[in-house]
């Protein structure tokens, strides 16, 4: 699933192309990506609306419209958001779920091969409630190591699972949780309430460093993810543990271990470095 760096990259790429543009009309190929909104309400709400802002919140791209509503897109496992200036390729057209014609002749397209993403159209009040249910942004200046430890350190669940829980801190998914825990030398299966303040400080610093580096590298591409310009990300070449199960640890040479026991997701770690 696109995580904070991937969605941040998409938003930065598309923002100049979308600000001030008016949506002339929109079409939707499938309803199963909609959450708490009907096809009729979504398409009617987009028609004639101008885009006044584009931002990221957690793993969502948020288009603020001049009507006061927000189109909120969570790309899911295989979602791609792009602005097309020419006719779509056969593949893009086949998997285009939402297509919105813009007043400059281009088209905003949400493509989702497996349709695991979600689309929401929220009023101002609905957006405030949605936003308040999410945790803090990990790269915000005010999200200190002390605040990080206070939010995560009370749980008895595995630290990796808590780190990925969007109620505690947003934007961190499986890829970057694996990487941050390895960098901080913390066993991903440890209960969060057993992690010391010093270890939380290390994890906080590594999480922020890795997310910042991933944004700089335009995110991680293994399969479906593309930037807002259609290019692949490059952070997959910098990963130290994720996707490297069975390979030697680049820190100590020990064979990296894969488990699905923590949260049902693939967790790769070094049992020597992350003792």
Image: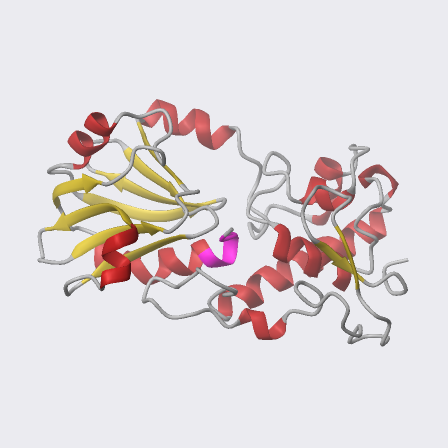
Left/right placement of residue 112 relative to residue 100 reads right
Q: Nearer the viewer, residue 258 or 51?
A: 258
Q: Position of residue 244 (x, y in %)?
A: 70, 68
Residue at 80%, 66% in the rendered image: 256
Left or right, 142 with respect to 161, comes to left
Residue 175 x/y as whole percent = 62, 57
Residue 5 on the magenta segment: yes
Q: Which residues make up the magenta segment?
A: 2-6
Magenta stretch holds residue 106? no
Q: How is the image coloured?
A: secondary structure
Q: Position of residue 163 (x, y in %)?
A: 68, 44
Main SS of the magenta segment?
Answer: helix
Quarter in which the C terminus is drawn: bottom right
Nearer the observer, 103 or 138:
103
Residue depicted at 34% across the width and 62% down the height: 228
Q: How many marks?
A: 0
* Residue at the spot 59% in from the left edge and 46% down from the top edge: 142
Res 16 seen here: no
Q: Is residue 234 above or below residue 34?
A: below
Q: Is residue 190 visible?
A: yes
Is 262 displayed left or right of 141 in the figure? right
Residue at the location (17% across, 54% down)? Answer: 107
Horizontal side of residue 263 vs 169, given as left or right: right
Vertical order, 43 against 138 (above or below):
above
Whole-percent x, y for residue 176 in the image: 63, 57
């Amino acid at each position: 699933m696109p995580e904070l760096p991937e969605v941040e990259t998409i938003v930065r790429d598309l923002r100049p192309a979308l600000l001030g543009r008016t949506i002339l009309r929109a079409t939707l190929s499938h309803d199963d990506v909609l959450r708490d909104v009907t096809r009729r309400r979504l398409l009617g709400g987009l028609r004639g609306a101008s885009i006044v802002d584009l931002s990221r919140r957690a793993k969502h791209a948020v288009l603020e419209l001049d009507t006061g509503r927000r189109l909120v897109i969570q790309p899911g496992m295989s979602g791609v958001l792009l602005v097309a200036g020419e006719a779509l390729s056969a593949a893009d057209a086949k998997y285009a779920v939402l297509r919105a014609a813009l007043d400059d002749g281009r088209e905003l397209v949400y493509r989702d091969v497996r349709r695991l993403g979600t689309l929401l159209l929220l009023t101002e009040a609905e957006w405030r409630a949605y936003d308040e249910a999410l945790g803090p942004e990990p790269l915000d200046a005010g999200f200190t190591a002390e605040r990080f430890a206070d939010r995560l350190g009370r749980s008895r669940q595995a630290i990796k699972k808590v780190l990925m829980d969007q109620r505690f801190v947003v934007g961190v998914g499986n890829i970057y949780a694996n990487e941050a825990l390895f960098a901080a030398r913390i066993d991903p299966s440890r209960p969060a309430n057993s992690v010391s303040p010093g270890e939380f400080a290390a994890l906080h610093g590594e999480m922020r460093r890795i997310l910042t580096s991933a944004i700089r590298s335009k995110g991680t591409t293994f399969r479906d993810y593309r930037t807002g310009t259609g290019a692949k990300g490059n952070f997959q070449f910098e990963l130290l543990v994720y996707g490297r199960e069975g390979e030697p640890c680049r820190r100590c040479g020990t064979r990296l271990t894969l488990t699905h026991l923590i949260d049902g997701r693939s967790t790769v770690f070094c049992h020597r470095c992350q003792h």
